[in-house]
Amino acid sequence: MQNNQSNRSKRPVGADRPFPWRCQRCGACRVVMTTTHYDAAVRHDGRDFEFAVPDLHIPSCEECGAKVFTEKVDDQIRAALRAHLHLLTPEEMRSALERIDMTQKEAAQRLGIAEATLSRWLNDIQIQSRALDNLLRVFFAFPKVRTVLDGGAQDPLLGSTDILDGRQRNSIKAL
């Protein structure tokens, strides 16, 4: 499961037909939907993560045991990875945008990310990094952060100064 999946469909031949399917490994017509414990290993945000998916619904061959990884199976693994990493879900992000009454376009502009990037997160095509998840959480939680992060109109000194009692003090020391 990678963010840069090829254009090749994960849908096996005959996937829209009812089970059983023909197994691509052994040729037997014994692929049925099963529920199993699955230990996943996924690379995300530059690191490898191992986690369990306790009730993975996956087509498996009763003859040879081959598992068929479909888009729905990938969705389950992606959801388990988000849960394992405690990342915001697309539903939580959409709900937060509604709560703060902000469009996807405005939020992306204020966060300094491409609207297409936010769209990929909201449509569960891509999982946000831990750093951007933290930024999203702060952005959604604190109205002052949303006010200060104002895209192109943002104060260019933001972050290069400390805020003390409403006054700014330059935090960059002369060398």
Image (cartoon, rainbow, N blue to C red):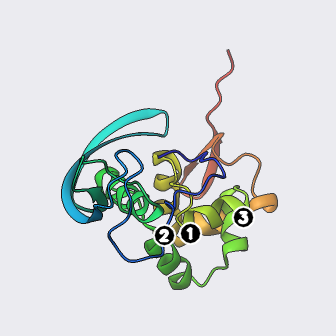
Q: Is residue 60 left or right of residue 10?
A: left
Q: Earlier in the sequence, mark 1 or mark 2?
A: 2
What percent of the width, then of the height, locates residue 107?
66, 69
How packed is label 1: few (under 14 Cα within 10 Å), some, or many (20 or more)?
many
- Give the alpha-carbon distance from disc 1 to disc 2, as whole Å: 5 Å
Q: Earlier in the sequence, mark 3 or mark 1?
A: 3
The answer to the question of whether label 2 and label 3 lie on touching residues, with beta carbons closer than 8 A, is no
Q: Residue at x 52, y 56 (%)?
A: 10
Going by the numbered disc 2, the residue's amino acid type is Pro
User: Residue 62's quadrant in the figure?
Assistant: bottom left
Going by the numbered disc 3, the residue's amino acid type is Glu
Is any part of residue 69 visible from this angle? yes
Label 1 sits on a secondary structure element that is: helix
Q: Is residue 170 above or below residue 74?
A: above
Q: Is residue 11 left or right of residue 49?
A: right
Mark 3 lies on residue: 115
Is any part of residue 149 visible from this angle? no
Going by the numbered disc 1, the residue's amino acid type is Leu
Q: Earlier in the sequence, mark 2 or mark 3?
A: 2
Along the line of sight, the residue nearer the viewer: 132 or 50: 50
What percent of the width, then of the height, locates residue 163?
57, 50
- Give the alpha-carbon distance from disc 2 to disc 3, as whole Å: 14 Å
Question: Which of the labelled discs sits on residue 90, or is there none?
Answer: 2
How packed is label 3: few (under 14 Cα within 10 Å), some, or many (20 or more)?
some
The answer to the question of whether label 1 and label 2 lie on touching residues, with beta carbons closer than 8 A, is yes
Mark 1 lies on residue: 122
What percent of the width, then of the height, locates residue 76?
36, 62
User: Residue 20's quadrant in the figure?
Assistant: bottom left
